[in-house]
Image: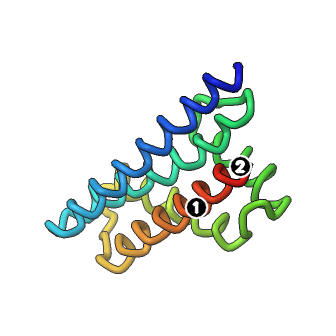
Amino acid sequence: MNNKVSKELVMHRLEQAKQEIKDAELLYKHKSYLSSNNRAYYSIFHSIRAVLATEPIDFKKHKDVIAYFNKNYIKTEIFPRKIGKKIVDANRIREDSDYDDEFIVKEEDTKNQIDTAKELLKLVEEYINNN
């Protein structure tokens, strides 16, 4: 992957992440918390993939994307460890929201999901602008 393609891919993924946050907020406003959790998580996921686009690496499975990010960006403290914990929580909430028929979504959890997505996007944008 050459630098030009990587930069375009980084920007594309950042735009995806921003759109997902907007969608999550709109769904939250209409009290559609399950769907809002999903969109907020995908903002997180696209933000992480934007970072990975700065390298010639990508994965097909969510767990591999998150594991690589945790190993190479959280454990090395390029990104704060606290955001790593929030990402793991966000993934769990998204999976519960999407797949657990008995999951009871809480408004506060959904708000936290959106806040985590915004926090990570801000950190990712700072990282990309400085590298």
Residue 20 vertical placement versus 102 (above, below): above
Q: What amino acid is found at the position of numbered circle 2 in the picture?
A: Phe
Name which of mark 1 and mark 2 comes first in the sequence: 2
**Which of the 4 image quarters holds residue 41?**
bottom left
Q: Along the line of sight, which residue is nearer the eye, 93 or 81? A: 81
Alpha-carbon span between mark 1 and mark 2: 10 Å
* Residue identifier under label 2: 69
Q: Residues within 10 Å of mark 2 (few under 14, many from 20)?
A: some
Q: What amino acid is found at the position of numbered circle 1 in the picture?
A: Ile
Asked if residue 114 lies left or right of residue 105, the reply is: right
Q: Assign a secondary structure to mark 2.
A: helix
> Where residue 96 sits in the image (x, y, percent)?
41, 58
* Residue identifier under label 1: 87
Asked if residue 65 lies left or right of residue 104, the reply is: right
**Which of the 4 image quarters holds residue 82?**
bottom right
Residue in the image at 78% along x and 60% along y: 78
Residue in the image at 58% along x and 42% along y: 50
Q: Along the line of sight, which residue is nearer the eye, 131 or 101? A: 131
> Where residue 122 sits in the image (x, y, percent)?
54, 63
Residue in the image at 18% along x and 69% along y: 29
**Which of the 4 image quarters holds residue 53?**
top right
> Where residue 130 sits in the image (x, y, percent)?
71, 54
